Image (spheres, helix red, strand yellow):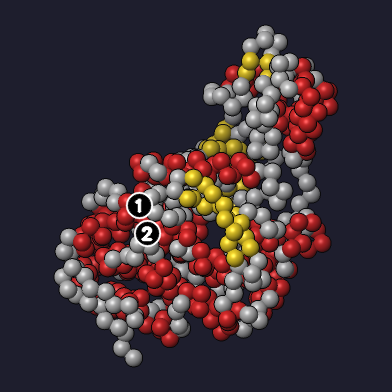
Amino acid sequence: MVALITSTTIVALITSTTIVAHITSTTIVAHTKTTTTNMHHGGDYDDFEDQVCEFFKALRDCGIDPFVVIDGGSDHTDKKFETLRQRVQSKIKQANHLLQESGLLPVLVKQVFKQVLSSLKWQNVSVQGGSSQNYIPCKRYTTTSFCRQVNINRQLLPVFAAIAGNDYVNLHNMGFSIKFEDNSPMEPNRKPRVDFFNRLLKWLARFQEQQEALDNVPRLIDPRDNQHNMDAAIQALSLSIETYQIQPGCLERFFNDGKAPDPGLLPDHLSVLPDWTLLPLMKGTLPSYMIYILLLRPVIQGVQVEDHSLPSGNITSRPIRQVFYGLLLGERREVEEYDREGKNLTSSKVEAILPSAAQQLLLDTLDQAPHPVRQEVFLETLGVSQSTLNGVPPHLGLPVAVTYYWRRHAHPQPDLPLLQALLLGLVYGELCRQRKSQRGFIEEGPVLERLRGLIQRGARSQDLGVTHAFSQWKRCMRDGLDLNQLLCFPLLEPQCAWLYKGTLVHQLVGQLRGGVTPDSLLMEDPFSGQLYRAMLVIIMEGNPIEDDQGWTVVKKKS
């Protein structure tokens, strides 16, 4: 069946791998993998942004008003924690094979947008016959049609999901194997699973009620299994089924009026949130994992491609997170972090700290603290003074501050070409941003032409040392952005799509180490040269370095 997505309002729920769009009473389910945009070398975020913009333009062309609901924090009961832990461990192994890097989303991609919405056929915008109305063709799936097709009662779908296995309960993992009437064992976790699903649905078709199906589950279990744990298995299945019951929501006020939900309507576990955080969390301008921290749950750090013989790149930005934790929990509390150690996922206790400027701040009134105080907390955390940043545009203050911090905390310490490549990448992003803001009415210029020429050469072979250094920078940037959001934006938040282009910066490192100079790339454009030198002098202040040609970056003049 084909549905025409026209001017009907869409509500899209985006997770890391799935798009679910709800159009009135119809549900469209589409599975998507990562974008075709180059995700090697840490991602090309500007290309990613272009695809997202094209998607929403296609919706606008069809008169569609989209609401996007981003998947929030993990289950507060920790029922899913073991599943998350296993997934991250799998990603660590995957990240160890550089050729598989495209399967890992770059760390900043969720900041640009959670995922490109590419499996809906949004590029096939067509004109409806007999009218000028544009539409996007798509498949329409409904639970009613599915149940009619497999001949089961709709209320048995949660039973089907629970027995098949999900993130909360899995009979096979509990030591129970399922055996159908022909005595052939079926393992739910073995691929392909379609045969198992079909046989389970056929078995369920004989029942009308959930409890009737549950009462017959013991007949599915191999009698050689540990039968005295059967009660525990049935109880686990019952609890899993309950998770599929739709609970009354508290989002109506937000979608209707753009206001924060009534605190009295929130689930009990969200009472830890100060009132001022509710609207920013709804708008996605506060990191949702802060809820997990306030509930004192373990925090799993993200995985990137990096050198697994070196400490995790997340350690570089840990002092930034410690301040983030301190603002949420108070000083000297501890957060349990899970992170990579070698190729294994391990846990450690991380102490929450507060810089001197934050000693009098309280989470409940953090939004009311004076701007200079919140700014000082951020800059003190990164080791930068406000006067130091005066030489760069305000919207680049945060990236420069983060790069200043990275230059001093990264291990091994970055050499000059690594730093130069990052800064040239920021110059490239700024030129692209300016040109896009003028809708392409300004000429590309010689600097953009040279840098685009490097991009068009294609990605260089992966240099593990370069990859590791830049993975540390990206994590510092991500944690810096989170801290800035929690402090209610004492520094302007940059447009993240223009901060890092992996294909370019990796090419630049090779060129710079081969003798190409930044001046040769920036000549004929005074603005680009001035911006580059201003950022370089700030970041190298008090910490000069000499390159292979004997060129020394001098300290900023007073």
Horizontal side, residue 324 vs residue 112: left or right: right
Disc 1 to disc 2, C-alpha distance: 9 Å
The residue to which callout 2 is attached is: 470
Q: Which mark is residue 41?
A: 1
1 or 2: mark nearer the eye: 2
Residue furthest bottom in the image: 558
Horizontal side, residue 502 vs residue 149: left or right: left
**In the rendered structure, which disc, 1 or 2, sits on the residue that comes first in sequence?**
1
Residue at image coords 47%, 74%: 382
Residue at image coords 31%, 67%: 419
Q: Could you classify mark 1 by the number of other residues whose Cα lies within 10 Å: few (under 14), some (14-19), or many (20 or more)?
A: many
List x then y, in percent, for residue 543.
Answer: 32, 77
Q: Residue 35, relative to residue 282: is it above or below?
A: above
Tags 1 and 2 touching, CB below 8 Å: yes
List x then y, in percent, for residue 357.
Answer: 58, 82
Q: Which one is nearer the viewer's eye here, 172 or 1? A: 172
Badge 1 element: helix
Q: Which one is nearer the viewer's eye here, 441 or 89? A: 89
Q: For the residue marked with disc 2, what is the amino acid?
A: Phe
Q: Which one is nearer the viewer's eye here, 508 or 24? A: 508
Residue at image coords 36%, 59%: 469
- Tell me where residue 521 sits by quadrant: bottom left
Horizontal side, residue 298 vs residue 459: left or right: right
List x then y, in percent, for residue 424.
Answer: 30, 67
Q: For the residue marked with disc 1, what is the amino acid?
A: His
Residue furthest top in the image: 182
